[in-house]
Amino acid sequence: MTETGVAEPETESKPKRRLPTVPCSVVWSRGHAYVLETGLSRARWVGCDDRGRPMEFTNAEIERRGWTLTRAS
């Protein structure tokens, strides 16, 4: 608290979670599951959209979309 009794905002922020790096890891983004595929080229997250069409994302794209390790209810 400051001298005037006003609470100061916390300066400590939560550490940013990192995407899993183990092949076949699963994350959820916008209600869809995505599996990490690795191979000779770069890693990618693959899954399906609402219509069952295949989709793939880079790590940066999944980070921008937002992700969790558990399915939202």
Image: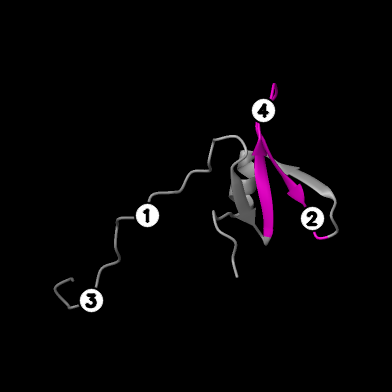
Nearer to us: label 1 or label 2: 2
Q: Mark 1, residues whose alpha carbon is within 10 Å: few (<14), some, or many (≥20)?
A: few
- Which residue is located at x 78 percent, y 46 percent? 55
> Label 2 amino acid?
Asp
Nearer-N-terminus badge (1/2): 1
Q: Position of residue 23 (x, y in %)?
A: 60, 34
Tell me the distance, in whole angstroms, between the alpha carbons under discs 1 and 4. 29 Å
**Count of labels in the image:** 4
Tell me the distance, in whole angstroms, between the alpha carbons under discs 3 and 2. 47 Å
Nearer-the-camera pick, 64 or 35: 35
Tell me the distance, in whole angstroms, between the alpha carbons under discs 4 and 2. 22 Å
Query: Residue at the top extreme?
Result: 40
Bounds of the magenta segment = 32-50
Pointer 3 residue: 6
Q: Position of residue 41 (x, y in %)?
A: 70, 24
Tell me the distance, in whole angstroms, between the alpha carbons under discs 1 and 2. 31 Å
Pointer 4 residue: 42
Nearer-N-terminus badge (1/4): 1
